Amino acid sequence: MAAGAPRVFVSHLSGVPVFDPNGDQVGRVRDLVAMLRVGGRPPRLLGMVVEVVSRRRIFVPMTRVTGVESGQVITTGVVNMRRFEQRPTERLVLGEFLDRRVRLTETDEEVTVLDVAIQQLPARRDWEIDKFFVRKGRGGALRRKGETLTVEWSAISGFSLEEHGQGAESLVATFERLRPTDVANAMHHLTPKRRAEVAAALDDDRLADVLEELPGDDQVEILGKLEEDRAADVLEAMDPDDAADLLSELPEADKERLLALMRPDDAADVRRLLSYEERTAGGLMTTEPIILRPDATVADALARVRQQDLSPALAAQVYVCRSPDETPTGKYLGTVHFQRLLRDPPYTLVSSIVDSDLVPLAPDTPLPAVTSYLAAYNMVSVPVVDESGSLLGAVTVDDVLDHLLPEDWRETDFQGEEGIAGGR
């Protein structure tokens, strides 16, 4: 870990207020949720259990936490109010780690865990548990006798997963290092029962990423075995175009029931996508490209492009539009490509370097025409604009490929002797 990365002892977080970006209090931290991992790796911190005003306890993912500061936690403000329910792979840090008796691996001495330190990984939003504050000798946390010391996660035993176990907990921990497409391939070859167990154990964001890489039949099967509230949460975490594709496979009554459970803004995006024919620009597009107003600068654009969750195709360009800057936007003015952003000074206005020569696509443009457009202009993403000139979304090359490749293309072994990586 890089020097200077923030480290916080969890005892200092218990009961601290949680605020949204406007300074309004969301609730208070009551616990932290971690996931154990195989191979001696430190546990990953998944999020916080926050008690809101109604005394309901909800889960706030660490991806929604923008700051852990002295006496407060700052979030993006976008939280799910569904009641927190602990999953089999999850451990409560305050409730299950503190006061626990463990052993030092070097001396086999028994120690008591008094506190746990978490640290944010450099250049990422991920957090890990990396150190333990422990007391030697027998006795609880209130006993003052015995030497205290701070040790690395690797210096203690008593928390690690049984790697040879057959529970979903161990399997999910094994999957943790894999890319979503590789997890999807592994899940595709599991039995339906096992697949459902793994899906239940994955957190919402991870399951959403994996579902986007699974064949349609597997997606429908897995979604159908989730509780409806959780199914709606997972759909919210998916890219809107992928969520729309999945919902289009469901019976009308099931589709409407899940849409009604989703947050209104997320449901509105998905409903809009469902209104277009599947093999058209409108049916293929995502409603969440990078959109900037004309008075934004190159520095603003590069900050947006750097966002970790963006796919390379969406990060390749920004779209300049008049307000409002959420789809459907105000008037679409043009595109600024990533390479152009690198060539101009940070203070340059994006409106002065916009490329307005390429004609955007209409939402009813058929798939063959979209494919030809991307190939002809060597583009990885193309804007979709309605008759009034408002930006509706963008079609990326990966979405086009999904509809051009054979249905079983996801089962290709890219690392095998016959795969792409195998030819030397």
Image (cartoon, helix red, strand yellow):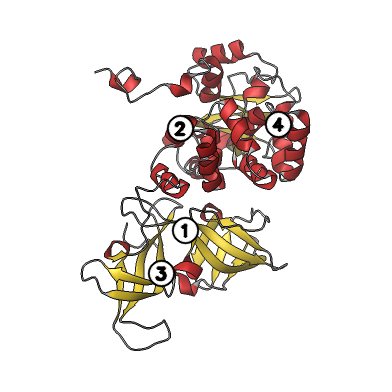
Residue 147, image quadrant: bottom left
Q: Nearer the viewer, residue 367 or 214?
A: 214
State which quarter of the image contains the N terminus. bottom left
Q: Is residue 349 visible?
A: no
In this view, the residue farthest toward the left is 107
The tag earlier along the polypeptide, 2 or 1, is 1
**Mark 1 is on which residue type?**
Ala
Q: Which residue is mark 3?
A: 116
Secondary structure category for the residue under label 3: strand
> Which residue does the image show at 52% across and 52% down from the upper left?
63
The tag earlier along the polypeptide, 3 or 4, is 3
Mark 1 near mark 4, Cβ–Cβ under 8 Å? no
Q: Is residue 401 visible?
A: yes
The tag earlier along the polypeptide, 2 or 4, is 2
Marks 2 and 4, Cα distance to the nearest angstrom?
A: 37 Å
Marks 2 and 1, Cα distance to the nearest angstrom?
A: 23 Å
Mark 2 near mark 1, Cβ–Cβ under 8 Å? no
Q: Which residue is mark 2?
A: 181
**Mark 4 is on which residue type?**
Lys
Mark 2 near mark 4, Cβ–Cβ under 8 Å? no
> Which residue does the image show at 63% across and 56% down from the upper left?
77
**Mark 3 is on which residue type?**
Val
Q: Residue 31 location, x and y as percent?
A: 54, 67
The tag earlier along the polypeptide, 3 or 1, is 1
> Which residue does the image show at 52% across and 55% down from the upper left?
62
Mark 3 near mark 1, Cβ–Cβ under 8 Å? no
Marks 3 and 4, Cα distance to the nearest angstrom?
A: 52 Å
Marks 3 and 2, Cα distance to the nearest angstrom?
A: 33 Å
Secondary structure category for the residue under label 4: loop
